[in-house]
Amino acid sequence: MGQYWRIMNIDNEESTGGLGKLGEFFWYSSQIISYLKTPPVIPSSFHTSSGIFEEKSQKRKEDPTSIILSLPNELLLAIAEELLEEYLDLICFSLTCSCIWDVTEQVRYRSLYSRLKTSSWAGGRIILLGDYAGALPKGLLTDAEKKQFELHGHDDDDLGALLYYYADEKFERPPANISLLTDKRIQANRILRKELLAYSHREPFSPWIWLWGDFTPSRSPQDRWIVRNLTKQEYVIKTRSRNLTQILYCLIGCSDDPSVSMRGGELLIHGAWAGDRIDITLVSFHKQEHEDESGWTNITAGVKKTLEELAAREMREFEF
């Protein structure tokens, strides 16, 4: 029947689901690229302005029945900092009044960035695994993870296929919607859901609740995408974005079986980056993060050669 494949993020315990045979999906774009792009600085559409509530901040501050609103801004900020890792709780606290909304702005940005990072695959251990896979890359899983994924005690040469089928049953799909309104606590609390839903239709609260928008780096015409291996400190630079998928697939495949339903596909079954920590960002961002690139290796030329060879065997037009 041929070998079937799936991409998984070991850290998030998430999987794309079955992708089919390699030749059936290799040359097409994939949502996986958006998962791996590093979240940028929060878009400007999230910026707020004061005086957004009907009640004026000072009036609310003078309300003798409100203890929390009588606190100085320093204490309000300290409370917000405690809620940094709980984005939903922080938003609910921030919506108390315009004063608190303004005070918590920078904390909200940090909390939102953390939320985006958590749902992102950027920097995770990524692998394109075949269901005929034998051994996994050395050191991919800890002993605790082998036990968790029900692989403990099995022969090393069987772990690849076993992980493939475990992921089929137990790994979740990456979330398509990270809106606060999909949170289980909101779904279970009708009053809170109704209140948040009302705010979700008002500016400037809408983007903070719906979390809509393009949370990928904004590329200038002069900038280029870079696919990075954070484990090995290697990278591939791509001029055009539409072939990022092929660069990724070229490097993360893992199987011991060459039946890939694709001419030359045997070149892909032992991907040099399989199971490593990978992300996609812009060259400008990479240079900001790593002014001294002495520890990094550019492997673009080798990947370009492999992809052009595959395209020639498949009689496809391919422009790197």
Image: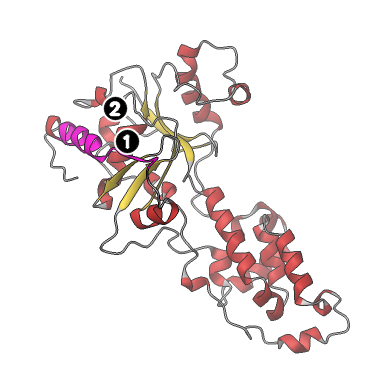
Q: For residue 94, which numbered disc appears in the image?
A: none
Q: Look at label 2 and name its amino acid.
A: Leu
Mark nearer the N terminus (2 vs 1): 1
Identify the magenta region: 294-311
Residue 141 is covered by the magenta coloring:
no
Q: Which residue is mark 1?
A: 249
Q: Which residue is located at x 68 percent, y 75 percent?
A: 103
In magenta stretch: residue 301:
yes
Q: Amino acid at mark 1?
A: Tyr
Question: Which percent across, then down, holds residue 279?
Answer: 42, 45
Kindly give the residue lying farthest to the top in the view shown. 155
Q: Tag 1, which secondary structure?
A: helix
> Label 2: which residue?
268
Q: Decide: marks 2, 1 in contact (CB < 8 A)?
A: yes
Is residue 96 placed above or below 227 in the rendered structure? Answer: below
Front residue of 256 and 77 = 77
Q: Residue at x 44, y 40 (%)?
A: 230
Q: Residue at x 67, y 87 (%)?
A: 54
Question: Picture quarter containing residue 227?
Answer: top left
